Amino acid sequence: MERRRAKRKKVNLKAERISCIENCSVFIEDISESGISMITAPSKKNDTFVPGSDLDLELTLSSGDAINLNCNVKWSFSNGPEEKSNTVGLEIVSPPAKFKEFLKNLR
């Protein structure tokens, strides 16, 4: 049974973690009005994404506009020592209208 509140769309988008110091790029695999599944860029340091913690993303649109998304980590797992990346599930907290419009126009 599907537990998600909104239908996810498969995408290949790049975003940046706002509160990050180095290797801040993330790749969004799927997205909905209420959530995101992302993969972090490979990093030498061992990032941990604790469920319940806040994580802010900046998504740059093809128009050049940026959308800041306040998210809450729901789950995460390491993709293995050879990949040095993580897959992270996020819940979007109060998605802005600009983001909802972007999703509506996403194909």
Image (cartoon, rainbow, N blue to C red):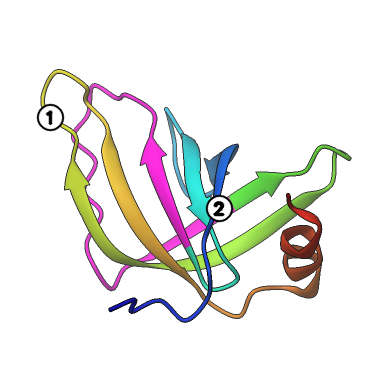
In the image, which residues are magenta? 36-57
Q: Dot 1: what SS?
A: loop
Residue 38: where, in percent of width, then height? 42, 46
Could you say which quadrant of the image residue 15 lies in? Answer: top right
Give above or below for 59 relative to 26. Answer: below
- Nearer to the camera, 19 or 67: 67
Q: From the viewer's perspective, is 62 left or right of 76?
A: right
Residue 71 located left or right of residue 39: right
Residue 103 placement: quadrant:
bottom right
Q: Residue at x 52, y 76 (%)?
A: 6
Q: Using the image, tell me which numbered label, if any, was put on residue 80.
A: 1
Nearest the camera: 33 or 107? 107
Question: Residue type at mark 1?
Answer: Gly
Residue shown at the point (77%, 64%) measured from the top left: 104
Q: Which numbered disc flags the more N-terminal residue, 1 or 2? A: 2
Q: Which mark is residue 8?
A: none
